[in-house]
Amino acid sequence: MEVSPDVVNEMKEEIGPDLFNKLLDMFKQGQVSVAELMQIPREELDNLHQFARQAIVRKDYDTADKVLAMLTSVDPYTAEYWLTYGIVLQINENWEMARFAFTTALNRSSKLLEAYVRAAECDIHLKSPGYALDILKAAFLLPAKDSQEIELMNRAKKLQLIAEKMEPGEFDRPEIDADMAEDDNDN
Protein backbone atom coordinates (compact mmCIF):
# COMPACT_ATOMS: atom_id res chain seq x y z
CA MET A 1 0.00 0.00 0.00
CA GLU A 2 1.54 3.27 -1.12
CA VAL A 3 0.73 6.49 0.73
CA SER A 4 1.04 9.81 -1.04
CA PRO A 5 3.51 12.37 0.36
CA ASP A 6 0.62 14.84 0.75
CA VAL A 7 -1.15 12.49 3.17
CA VAL A 8 2.07 11.98 5.14
CA ASN A 9 2.67 15.73 5.39
CA GLU A 10 -0.95 16.33 6.37
CA MET A 11 -0.65 13.75 9.16
CA LYS A 12 2.60 15.29 10.41
CA GLU A 13 0.93 18.69 10.60
CA GLU A 14 -2.20 17.34 12.25
CA ILE A 15 -0.56 15.31 15.03
CA GLY A 16 2.86 16.94 15.18
CA PRO A 17 6.22 15.60 14.04
CA ASP A 18 7.18 14.02 17.39
CA LEU A 19 4.02 11.92 17.69
CA PHE A 20 4.14 11.14 13.96
CA ASN A 21 7.73 9.83 14.25
CA LYS A 22 6.83 7.81 17.35
CA LEU A 23 3.85 6.23 15.54
CA LEU A 24 6.01 5.53 12.51
CA ASP A 25 8.58 3.75 14.70
CA MET A 26 5.78 1.74 16.35
CA PHE A 27 4.48 0.79 12.90
CA LYS A 28 7.92 -0.38 11.79
CA GLN A 29 8.13 -2.55 14.92
CA GLY A 30 4.67 -4.03 14.29
CA GLN A 31 3.12 -2.33 17.31
CA VAL A 32 0.59 -0.29 15.35
CA SER A 33 -1.36 -1.08 12.17
CA VAL A 34 -1.69 0.99 9.02
CA ALA A 35 -5.31 1.63 10.03
CA GLU A 36 -4.20 3.09 13.36
CA LEU A 37 -1.39 5.02 11.76
CA MET A 38 -3.73 6.49 9.15
CA GLN A 39 -6.42 7.01 11.83
CA ILE A 40 -9.02 5.07 9.85
CA PRO A 41 -12.13 4.83 12.04
CA ARG A 42 -13.02 1.31 13.25
CA GLU A 43 -16.53 1.83 11.86
CA GLU A 44 -15.16 2.22 8.31
CA LEU A 45 -13.10 -0.96 8.64
CA ASP A 46 -16.09 -2.85 10.01
CA ASN A 47 -18.23 -1.54 7.14
CA LEU A 48 -15.69 -2.95 4.67
CA HIS A 49 -15.77 -6.24 6.54
CA GLN A 50 -19.57 -6.31 6.33
CA PHE A 51 -19.37 -5.50 2.62
CA ALA A 52 -17.02 -8.48 2.12
CA ARG A 53 -19.36 -10.76 4.08
CA GLN A 54 -22.25 -9.65 1.89
CA ALA A 55 -20.14 -10.36 -1.20
CA ILE A 56 -19.63 -13.92 0.09
CA VAL A 57 -23.39 -14.33 0.53
CA ARG A 58 -23.84 -13.11 -3.08
CA LYS A 59 -21.14 -15.62 -4.12
CA ASP A 60 -18.98 -12.76 -5.38
CA TYR A 61 -15.87 -14.42 -4.02
CA ASP A 62 -13.42 -12.39 -6.11
CA THR A 63 -14.66 -9.12 -4.60
CA ALA A 64 -14.67 -10.61 -1.10
CA ASP A 65 -11.12 -11.90 -1.57
CA LYS A 66 -9.81 -8.51 -2.71
CA VAL A 67 -11.57 -6.55 0.06
CA LEU A 68 -10.44 -8.96 2.77
CA ALA A 69 -6.85 -9.09 1.49
CA MET A 70 -6.75 -5.29 1.71
CA LEU A 71 -8.53 -5.24 5.07
CA THR A 72 -6.16 -7.74 6.70
CA SER A 73 -3.21 -5.77 5.32
CA VAL A 74 -4.47 -2.48 6.72
CA ASP A 75 -5.59 -3.98 10.03
CA PRO A 76 -3.82 -7.30 10.63
CA TYR A 77 -4.81 -7.42 14.31
CA THR A 78 -8.56 -8.08 14.02
CA ALA A 79 -9.32 -11.79 14.30
CA GLU A 80 -12.74 -11.60 12.65
CA TYR A 81 -11.25 -10.13 9.47
CA TRP A 82 -8.82 -13.05 9.24
CA LEU A 83 -11.58 -15.56 9.93
CA THR A 84 -13.73 -14.17 7.12
CA TYR A 85 -10.71 -14.02 4.80
CA GLY A 86 -10.00 -17.66 5.59
CA ILE A 87 -13.59 -18.57 4.73
CA VAL A 88 -13.37 -17.03 1.25
CA LEU A 89 -9.96 -18.65 0.68
CA GLN A 90 -11.43 -21.98 1.78
CA ILE A 91 -14.39 -21.55 -0.58
CA ASN A 92 -11.86 -20.99 -3.37
CA GLU A 93 -10.04 -24.16 -2.23
CA ASN A 94 -6.87 -22.27 -1.46
CA TRP A 95 -6.23 -24.59 1.49
CA GLU A 96 -2.77 -23.42 2.54
CA MET A 97 -3.65 -19.74 2.55
CA ALA A 98 -6.97 -20.46 4.25
CA ARG A 99 -5.11 -22.44 6.95
CA PHE A 100 -2.76 -19.47 7.40
CA ALA A 101 -5.71 -17.07 7.72
CA PHE A 102 -7.46 -19.26 10.31
CA THR A 103 -4.25 -19.68 12.30
CA THR A 104 -3.70 -15.93 12.21
CA ALA A 105 -7.27 -15.40 13.45
CA LEU A 106 -6.55 -17.81 16.32
CA ASN A 107 -3.34 -15.97 17.15
CA ARG A 108 -5.47 -12.84 17.53
CA SER A 109 -8.27 -14.56 19.50
CA SER A 110 -8.09 -18.13 20.75
CA LYS A 111 -11.85 -18.23 21.36
CA LEU A 112 -12.97 -18.50 17.70
CA LEU A 113 -14.34 -22.04 17.54
CA GLU A 114 -15.12 -21.67 13.83
CA ALA A 115 -11.47 -20.88 13.07
CA TYR A 116 -10.33 -24.10 14.79
CA VAL A 117 -12.85 -26.22 12.89
CA ARG A 118 -12.10 -24.61 9.54
CA ALA A 119 -8.33 -24.88 10.09
CA ALA A 120 -8.79 -28.60 10.78
CA GLU A 121 -10.80 -28.94 7.54
CA CYS A 122 -7.90 -27.33 5.69
CA ASP A 123 -5.45 -29.73 7.36
CA ILE A 124 -7.53 -32.67 6.20
CA HIS A 125 -7.56 -31.33 2.63
CA LEU A 126 -3.80 -30.81 2.91
CA LYS A 127 -3.49 -34.44 4.07
CA SER A 128 -2.12 -33.44 7.47
CA PRO A 129 -4.35 -35.35 9.89
CA GLY A 130 -1.90 -34.94 12.78
CA TYR A 131 -2.22 -31.18 12.60
CA ALA A 132 -6.01 -31.50 12.25
CA LEU A 133 -6.16 -33.60 15.42
CA ASP A 134 -3.93 -31.17 17.31
CA ILE A 135 -6.07 -28.17 16.44
CA LEU A 136 -9.27 -30.07 17.20
CA LYS A 137 -7.94 -30.87 20.69
CA ALA A 138 -7.75 -27.14 21.30
CA ALA A 139 -11.25 -26.65 19.85
CA PHE A 140 -12.71 -29.23 22.22
CA LEU A 141 -11.51 -27.15 25.18
CA LEU A 142 -13.88 -24.33 24.21
CA PRO A 143 -17.46 -24.24 25.48
CA ALA A 144 -20.32 -24.52 22.98
CA LYS A 145 -22.66 -21.76 24.14
CA ASP A 146 -25.28 -21.63 21.40
CA SER A 147 -26.76 -23.71 18.60
CA GLN A 148 -24.18 -22.52 16.05
CA GLU A 149 -21.30 -23.51 18.34
CA ILE A 150 -22.94 -26.87 19.11
CA GLU A 151 -23.16 -27.45 15.35
CA LEU A 152 -19.46 -26.52 15.02
CA MET A 153 -18.57 -28.98 17.79
CA ASN A 154 -20.47 -31.73 15.98
CA ARG A 155 -18.58 -30.86 12.80
CA ALA A 156 -15.33 -30.99 14.79
CA LYS A 157 -16.18 -34.48 16.06
CA LYS A 158 -16.81 -35.67 12.49
CA LEU A 159 -13.50 -34.17 11.38
CA GLN A 160 -11.75 -35.92 14.27
CA LEU A 161 -13.10 -39.29 13.07
CA ILE A 162 -11.95 -38.56 9.51
CA ALA A 163 -8.47 -37.46 10.66
CA GLU A 164 -8.06 -40.52 12.88
CA LYS A 165 -8.68 -42.80 9.86
CA MET A 166 -6.18 -40.99 7.61
CA GLU A 167 -2.58 -41.98 7.04
CA PRO A 168 -0.09 -39.47 8.42
CA GLY A 169 0.70 -36.78 5.86
CA GLU A 170 4.09 -35.54 4.78
CA PHE A 171 4.12 -32.90 7.52
CA ASP A 172 2.80 -35.26 10.19
CA ARG A 173 5.80 -37.57 10.14
CA PRO A 174 7.96 -37.30 13.29
CA GLU A 175 11.17 -37.81 11.32
CA ILE A 176 10.38 -34.79 9.15
CA ASP A 177 9.57 -32.72 12.23
CA ALA A 178 12.88 -33.84 13.75
CA ASP A 179 14.75 -32.96 10.53
CA MET A 180 13.10 -29.54 10.50
CA ALA A 181 14.04 -28.99 14.15
CA GLU A 182 17.66 -29.90 13.32
CA ASP A 183 17.61 -27.43 10.42
CA ASP A 184 16.28 -24.74 12.78
CA ASN A 185 19.05 -25.48 15.27
CA ASP A 186 21.67 -25.21 12.51
CA ASN A 187 20.71 -21.56 11.87
Image: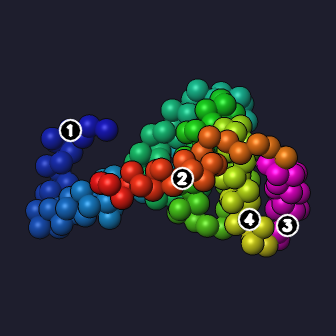
Colouring convention used in this rendered image of the protein: rainbow
Q: Which mark is residue 137?
A: 4
Sooner in the amino-acid sequence: mark 2 or mark 4? 4
Q: Determine the CA span between mark 3 and mark 2.
A: 38 Å
Q: Determine the CA span between mark 1 and mark 3.
A: 47 Å
Mark 1 and mark 4 residues within 8 Å of each other at the beta carbon: no
Q: Determine the CA span between mark 2 and mark 4.
A: 20 Å
Kindly identify which residue carries mark 2: 177
Three-letter residue code for mark 4: Lys
Sooner in the amino-acid sequence: mark 1 or mark 3? 1
Mark 2 and mark 4 residues within 8 Å of each other at the beta carbon: no
Percent position of residue 49, x then y: 57, 47
Residue 145 is one of the magenta-drawn residues: yes
Residue 66 is one of the magenta-drawn residues: no
Q: Is residue 82 above or below residue 169?
A: below
- Taking the spot 87% from the left edge, 52% from the top edge, the residue there is 161
Quadrant showing the C terminus: bottom left
Three-letter residue code for mark 1: Ser
Secondary structure beneath label 4: helix
Kindly identify which residue carries mark 1: 4
- Quadrant position of residue 88: top right
Q: Determine the CA span between mark 4 and mark 3.
A: 20 Å
